[in-house]
Amino acid sequence: MHKKNFFKNLLSKKQTKCPCCKKNKSNSTFIKELINLPKYPITEFYRKRKEKFVKEALVNQKVLYCKQCDHMFLENILDIDKIYNNTITTSHSSRGAILCLENFFLFIKKNTKNIKNYNLVDIGGNDSTFLEFFKGHKKDRLNLDANAHSQDKTIKNKKVFLEKFDFRTIKSSVSTAYLSSHTLEHLENPFKLLEKLSNNLKKSDVIYLQFPSLEKLIEHKKFDQICHQHINYFSLKSINLILRKLGLYILKYEYDTSHFGTVRLKISNNRKMKAHLKTEKNLYKKTLDSYNQFLSYYKNLQKNLTENFVNGQGFGAGLMVPILAYYLPIINRLDYLVDENKFKIGKKFINLKPEIKNIKFININKPVLITSISTKEAGRNIFNKLTKIGVRDICIPSIIV
């Protein structure tokens, strides 16, 4: 178990400037304190069944919003060295993540038909799952990640924190496609990474990014996706502002609601090919309205579920369960959570009470609360599984699935 001092020292710094326009929180005309999250739970940390609940694993958090850029970001940033040295997440372990990567792969193939002739550099490639999609690729494949590893020996892995990597070390006369899936939102200074990347970009190179979309978070009222690991929440407008400052242009884009609510971009330094962007208007007001509706929904749901689920059972110990429990406290009063990940069996979240048990503990005669709902795919798969084993009453506490 991690010592309490580990969590006391986890807060690294405050981010009070918009990463897009550098307006400061002191300028209340543009930077608004959108959401206050006292004692907000840290995700992805587990403890053994008999170890004590760790109160220090709750950090006061605030969400800021830049009205000039339509960009949302966290004020309090945790120590990334501690967070990512602790991570157990791998791309292949999440069906929602795999589906999102499959769709990202199709987007790339559709928009760069000769992709097999490019060197591939996956920025934040984790376990190299995405690079493995490019089977039989004739050019180089490089994975850059603090936890970079791969079972495919033809993939090169470089363990590095992305903000510290020097892209000038990538020297090749061959065109390069830089790929990055659900990484940009984790970076304290995404501008710095993109700047270093743009300075090394040849005219024939392309960049493909996908990350959570602020527009889709608002549309689907998924504020339970806000977590300490996701520092920045980009709108199409805010990412475009950063790219334009660097002489980069969005050539193609699309949205995907299968995983978090994702936006995908094809980018290059060719302004003649830039796409016409359809950006949302009045996004700040829409964000406020959506968050208030989200709060009202979960407040009423908590009242409705209390009678059925005290000392009940939940299914799913996904990483975002502590966040869901923040808005739906009944989860912390369940007897246990069921999960199929062997690593988690017999453990508890560092800041939740229910033990995580094997699926054999499911009682089909008692209602089951689905607790892993961060992606539509996760909620639907669990619902289908529970239906097949004969569970009589199932609740999915999500606004949209």
Image (cartoon, helix red, strand yellow):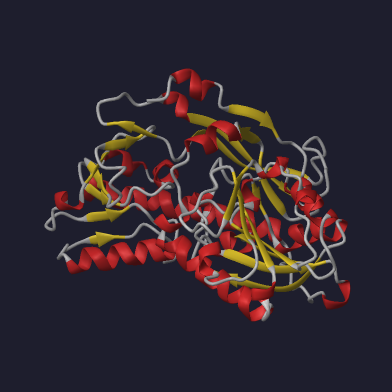
Left or right: residue 123 versus residue 274 is left
Left or right: residue 142 versus residue 204 is left
Number of marks: 0
- Residue appearing at x 17%, y 62% in the figure: 391
Residue 257 visible in this rendered orientation of the protein: no
**Which is more toward the observer, 157 or 82?**
157
**Which is more toward the observer, 196 or 395?**
196
Residue 247 % position (x, y):
87, 61
Residue 115 % position (x, y):
66, 75
**Which is more toward the observer, 35 or 391?**
391
**Which is more toward the observer, 161 or 281?**
161
Residue 165 visible in this rendered orientation of the protein: yes
Looking at the picture, does residue 29 appear above or below residue 211?
Answer: above
Looking at the picture, does residue 41 appear above or below residue 151?
Answer: above
Looking at the picture, does residue 269 appear above or below residue 228?
Answer: below
Residue 378 % position (x, y):
38, 61
The quadrant of the rendering that contains the C terminus is bottom left
Left or right: residue 386 versus residue 82 is left
The quadrant where residue 282 appears: bottom right
- Residue appearing at x 81%, y 53% in the figure: 68
- Residue appearing at x 24%, y 61% in the figure: 394
